[in-house]
Image (cartoon, helix red, strand yellow):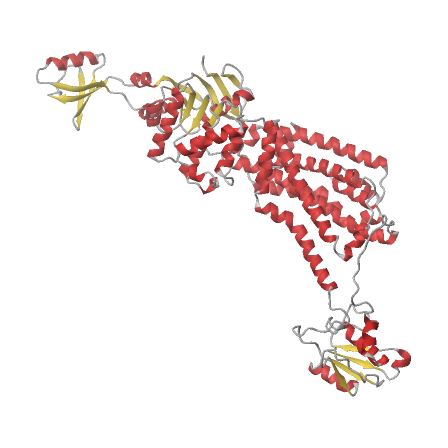
Amino acid sequence: MHTIIVSNLAKSFGTVQAVADVSFTVSPGEIFGLLGPNGAGKTTTLRLMMDIFKPDAGEIAIFGGDLTLDKKRRIGYLPEERGLYKEEKLETTLLYLAQLKGVDEKTARQRLGEWLERLDLAEQRQQKIQTLSKGMQQKAQIIATLLHDPDLIIIDEPFSGLDPVNTRLVKQIFEEQRAAGKTIIMSTHQMHQVEALCNRIVLINRGRSVLYGLVNEIKRNFAGNAIVLEGQGDFSQVPGVLDVRQHNGTWEMGLQVGTDPQAVLQQLLTQPDNRITRFELAEPSLDDIFVQVVGRSNQ
Amino acid sequence: MKTIWLVIKHDVAFVLRQRSFWIMTLLMPALLLGSNAYIAAQDNAPALTTPTPADQPAPPHIGLVDHANLIALVPDDLPPHLFLPFADKTNAQAALDQGDISQYVVIPADFASGGEIVIYDRGFQLLSGGDNGSVAFNGRYDWALTYLITANLTNDTQLAAVVQNPTPRATTQFHRLQPPAPADESNNLGMAIIVARVMPYLFYFLLIMGGSYMMRSVVAEKENRTVEILLLSLEPTQLMIGKIIAMSVIVAIQLVVWVGGGMLILDRAATVMQLTSFAFPPGFFVWAILFLLLGYLLFAAIMSAVGALATNAREGGQAIWILVIPLMPTLMFGQLFAEEPNHPLVIALSLFPFSSPSAMVTRLAVGAVPAWQLVVSLLALVGTTWLFIVLAGRFFKSGNLLSDTSFSWRRLASGWRG
């Protein structure tokens, strides 16, 4: 059963069409990437999903139906702009937010202690939030998102302000949550993080879904007719190859239309002087795909 | 219900941790304490026969022109050189002009028959009235002249001291054996004016403070973006109700500190013994609490709507000053409330729901209010408060709470209309 089903969602504010036609589903145990350029409608889509705004059209089903208050409490939300009481102590704020989610104080205190230790904030628990660094505040916000042990985790730019060590730690935490069967939706502009964490994505541009599916499939679909090759030998004269570029021992070969990469590999292996150590389809990065798709849909 | 309780607990604790709250709350009793201490200091001026301690400031020099040849004896317990004899008024005036003396006293030759003494001073003393023989002498030696004259009339310094203060070691204790008799009408009018002046300010500050705490609390959660998190844990109306109740607790704390602290301090002051004898009408405090509570709820609902529309505290603060205008007439016409509690303007203000919380309570404090007016005023206030709480609920929704659009009266008006 899908945790989230979004169908043909639309929402406008006055004359501005924030979301025009967005559809996707997300299931337990996956990290789903919600991508798009600035102003594409990602945050509005998230707020529609969380019942903060009402859609003009389309349907949303969360945990199998409409979003009730009880279901809302099963959601952990990490907004792009941090939402913490800056003049309050870290512990006070996090306990308050967890209790509002229905966690009793004793349990909340126990879990909080564990999270603070894990994210190296134990010494700061009695400090006012405004005295914490950006990275510490982001980690505090992550704790606020996870402290009530939500089934659906919605994270908007979760790595903002984090150094590489903490980024790795937070990635590991989200991997663990996924492994525990939680549903995670991640909205970010950091494409390498999407490639590392997400198994499926939807790309929204101008309020519409323009790309949707498994990350690997999407990359394969955008791979085009090119191969990457490493090894020893003369790879400049291969039948069916349109152009060849060599860079730091890696060969990139553009294939003629209709040329099967498997046929090229067999051809290369028939040459006794050739030693092939790497052969793969040249996949574009998600970053390249993002730019290409957004550029195309803007035309 | 538990969620609302959590909001109440959190918001009350948050305000109580604010230094500004305690400064505002303790300021009024502190001012009363200060003024009380000043009055007490004035009342505790040296007793008539108290010898002057050596470490006190040097006593003034007062010229003495004795045409009656009365002064032959200068008591030892008078400060030395307090009175300097002069042969005539011309010499004394010259010494006064040169600053050698601060005042001089002329005892006319016919003092024994007329009893008149003339005091000459460099400055004109507006409040002396010219009929007080002990005028000035820098305040500390008011007693000295009468003591000097009595000692010379009786030729006995001990007798003169007894005449000045017959019970030097007596202490006074008051024991109230029965309820105080009703204050006489003239005294009650004076006290009514004071009550009519104080009561609207008390209500004004309580309503304004409570309302602005409400507004600031909503705006703060918009500014720090916590409202987006909160809306995933509770309904907007739960948040609004929690905040309104929390701020009513804050107002109650302020009320207790202001009224309780104020009465505790003032009760000790002699001047306020009269105020405590001022008789509040039966049931006054029940009505006062009822009107204050409803008035608070009315203003809190309005302020919560303003807070939901404002993007920051500055915007909300500007709106508040316009919205509290209905409370102003009660402040301006305090005397009218005391002197003519049934004046048409006073009646109108005490029936109008936006001014009735302070106006009706002030009227109740200073005079009898017809029962029908009390009932009409209360019903109008209940109805208006209920209406505005419902209307405020329209503003307290996600769209407004997450909006970055600036506050405007047009938005407020269109929101009221739905």
Residue B349 visible? The answer is no
Q: Residue visible at 82% across and 36% down?
A: B374
The residue sitting at the bottom extreme is B87
Task: Give the camera-side residue of B74 and B110.
Answer: B74
> In the figure, is residue B38 to the left or right of A260?
right
Residue A136 in the image: x percent, y percent?
Answer: 41, 37
Task: Give the camera-side residue of B227 and A121.
Answer: A121
Residue A281 in the image: x percent, y percent?
Answer: 24, 18
- Which of the image's four quarters has the C terminus of chain B? top right
> In the figure, is residue B396 to the left or right of A142?
right
- Which of the image's four quarters has the N terminus of chain B? top right
Against A97, residue B97 (above or below) is below
Q: Quadrant of residue B412?
A: top right
The residue sitting at the left extreme is A273
Residue A179 visible? The answer is yes
The residue sitting at the right extreme is B113
Residue B344 in the image: x percent, y percent?
Answer: 83, 42
